[in-house]
Amino acid sequence: MHGMAPAAPLESLLDQPVPDLTLPSTIGPFGFRRFAGVRPLVLFFYLRNGTPG
C-alpha cells in the first residue's frame, strides 16, 4: 500500500488506555471508561456475515 504508514505491531497496542468512546448496545450506551481500572475489557470486532472486507 503505497503512501500509507505501516501498521503498528499488535503488541504495541497492549496495555494502552482505551479512548473515551461510547457505543450503542442492546442495553443502552456502553462507555469504555466506565470499566477503566475495574476489570479487564476485551474489545472484539465482528464483520457482519456476507459483507466484503
Image (cartoon, grey):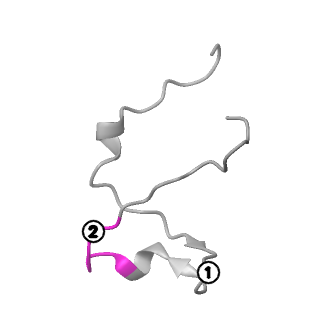
**What residue do we see at 55% from left, 69% from top?**
21
Q: Is residue 38 rendered magenta in the image?
A: yes
* Main SS category, magenta section: loop
Q: Check disc 2 and report the residue beneath it.
A: 40
Residue ranking furthest to the top: 2
Q: Check disc 1 and report the residue beneath it.
A: 26
> Are the residues flagged by discs 2 and 1 in contact, CB closer than 8 Å?
no
Residue ranking furthest to the bottom: 28
**What residue do we see at 43% from left, 59% from top?**
43
Compared across the picture, whether 5 is left or right of 17 comes to: right
- The one of 11 and 51 positioned closer to us in this rendering: 51
Between marks 2 and 1, how big is the CA–CA gap? 21 Å
Residue type, label 2: Pro
Mark 2 vs 1, N-terminal side: 1
Q: Position of residue 34 (x, y in %)?
A: 41, 82
Residue type, label 1: Thr
Q: Position of residue 44 (x, y in %)?
A: 46, 55
Q: Position of residue 46 (x, y in %)?
A: 56, 51
- The one of 29 and 50 positioned closer to us in this rendering: 50
**What residue do we see at 33% from left, 55% from top?**
16
The circle drawn on residue 14 is: none
